[in-house]
Image: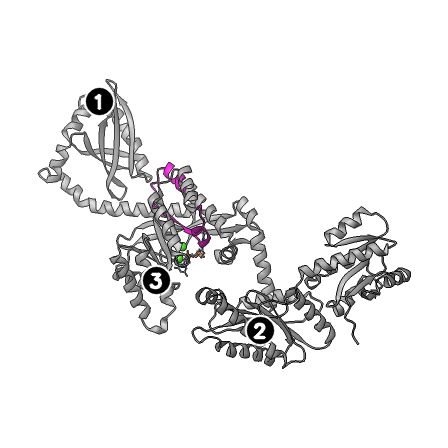
Amino acid sequence: MKSMKNTILIVDDEEIVKKSLRDVLKDEYDTLEAENGQEALDMLAMHAESIVVIVLDVVMPVMDGLSFLEHFRNHQEYNNIPVIVATSNEDEGVEQKCLEYGVWDFVMKPYNPVLLQFRIKNVIDKSRMLMSERDPVTGLYTKLKFYQKVRHMLTEAVGEKFAFVRIDIDRFKMINNFYGIKEGDKVLLAIAKELIRISSVFDYFVYARLENDVFACCLPYREENIELLVNDLQINLKKVNKDYNIKVSCGVYVINDYNMDVSEMYDRAYLAAKTCKGKFVQNVAYYDESMIEDMRQEQFVINAVNKAIEEEQFVVYLQPKVNLVTGKPYGAEALVRWMHPKQGMIAPGEFIPIYERNGIIGRLDQYMWKSVCKLLRRWIDEGRNPDPISVNVSRVNIYNPHLVEILNKLITEYRIPPQLLNLEITESAFMEDQALVMKTMKRLHNLGFKIMMDDFGSGYSSLNVLKDMDVDYLKIDMKFLQQDDEFNGKGEKVLTSVVRMAKWLHLPSIVEGVETEEQVDFLKCIGCEYAQGFYYAKPMPVVDYEMYIARERRKEDQSSMNENASMISELWNTRSAVSMLFEALDVPVAIYEYRNDKIEMLRSNTLYERYINIENRELQRKEKEELRKVFSRIAIGNYDYHVEVDRENNKRYRISAKVLGKRTNTLVIMVTYMDIS
Ligand code: C2E
Ligand code: CA
Ligand code: CA
């Protein structure tokens, strides 16, 4: 008959020591004995369930105590088994190492039997408290116990191929929230019941509830077995409540390394499970090696973030937005790019979703806001008169209680007019706690910020949200059109009515992802106000954007100059209204032609003639020199220019020059003088 006593594993290479221990402990405990660390690990694999304490010698052949501890610690399923280390000399180094490995207690060799028994009893009591074997809701094993059971089964059934399966319930939180905890427990119990039922089908089957809505099992691997498990679960869970559909996601790791720690098997099954999350049909996903690669990449991305922020590896790219009515650019969206010193440019798709999952995105956002504020400050200082730049505000920041404060501090520090820093908030972030978001938006509005609802149409929000949410612009993704080719034009109708409805709410729309001329025509046709997309420009580095804007503004000047051409011909007509106006201005005004560095006056008003004083040759020469300088500046692209000059009788004038028209090699320039003395 099997003994009901607890088992103590004695790990020691000296027979005489083991015998004395056996004698001391035999009344109360069973004992198992191992010669060295390796033997001890083997015994654990077989008997971990019954072992309550390990008494460990440090100095042993084959595998000594410290190496044993190093292996032992890596097995999560043994975490609850206390280790008492026997020391004969006071080697502080060893003792410290032991403590690092999580050793519970020490005894001195040779053993004092009474003391030893006390120490053993103490650690057993403590470990009992730490480890409860059964989950109170379902009665299934808890994690540690389950890991032990798995290890035991794998060791026992040598030669059999096993799979480790992680099972969890999609949107379990929602069931809890909508139907109450009791209903949630009902679902958990239903799964437990199913697992118990299925366990009778297989010779080997261990299962447990690991946490919340996560279950796991380990069973002989054959594809049919997995199918059976998943189908049974799926079918029987449907019966729990007809009001909602329960979907489980199963991640499967087909075990190929039987020495791997059980917790690592779990990790692999989990990686697989993640790939079926959020997909409507897929219930099962198998682990493959690329997933561990993805996980390493994820780890890399997370670990590198501090350094990347410190070393300013994240840079701002800008993608222009275009006003569809005027055809002119109006501001841009700031998009992050990661310039990694070794890997080169990393696209946001590779790190933003990861940072979003674990909250790091909050810091990255703030880094971007600051970069954009610095940029705006520089542009203002350089007299560039910038258009608004929008930045992305992710969910964690929307729910960050300091958001308003942080943004306010930034615009104060960099002296940025708030209407220049627009905030893009993704539609889905509005949904969790609408009241809170509304309050935050109100405070942002009070400070003068403009808010855009980003990715509208990509999520679940209804049109109703728009009416309640006080945003200033609507950003709609063109991709949401492309998705449904097969719905023959339905998407276009939806887009049309969304843009119309936005108009009723006095919300200008910005459509992003615009790639073709047809799309642009369509958008103009339905009255959409702004567009953003590769058709106009890809996101670009700041210098490129500066050049882009300079180029576009020059184009604008040019086209407004063409309009001016007719006005200029009016000027020569002495009886025209324009001419009368010219004469009526009460400042000196003249029109010059500038060609190949020669200047020639075409026309002036009487005040100008008085100012320049036809009699005074010297003044005329000086004046021409001044104007030549001004015009040469204008010729290289400064279409508006002014200088201040000192003249006789302590007079000081501000000379302003403005290009009215341009023909090949020739500029027509208007000059006005203002007395500022
Ligand atoms: P988003 O906010 O919707 O940004 C628009 C994305 O669409 C950008 O991708 C942009 O390059 C891309 N795009 C623009 N025009 C076109 C087009 O014509 N065709 C196509 N196919 N794509 C176009 P990007 O830069 O790769 O960024 C992807 C997402 O990453 C962004 O989507 C945004 O959600 C996030 N993201 C980027 N930068 C930041 C940031 O600084 N902070 C935060 N929180 N998220 C960011
Ligand atoms: Ca955006
Ligand atoms: Ca977007």
Could you tell me which quadrant the C terminus lies in? Answer: top left
In the image, what residue occupies the spot 27% across and 30% down? 627
Residue type at numbered disc 2: Ala
On the picture, is 84 further left or further right than 264? right
| Colour mapping | one colour
Could you tell me which quadrant the N terminus lies in? Answer: bottom right
Q: Nearer the viewer, mark 3 or mark 2?
A: 2
Res 550 seen here: no
Asked if the residue at label 2 sits under 8 Å from ligand 1, the reply is no
The relative height of residue 588 versus residue 376 in the rendered view (above or below) is above
Range of magenta residues: 375-402
- Judge by depth and name the residue closer to the eye, 573 or 78: 78
Badge number at residue 516: 3
In the image, farthest residue toward the right: 16
The answer to whether the residues at label 2 and label 1 have Cβ atoms under 8 Å apart is no
Residue type at numbered disc 1: Arg
Residue 179 pos. (x, y %): 45, 67
The CA span between labels 2 and 1 is 106 Å
Residue 304 pos. (x, y %): 57, 51
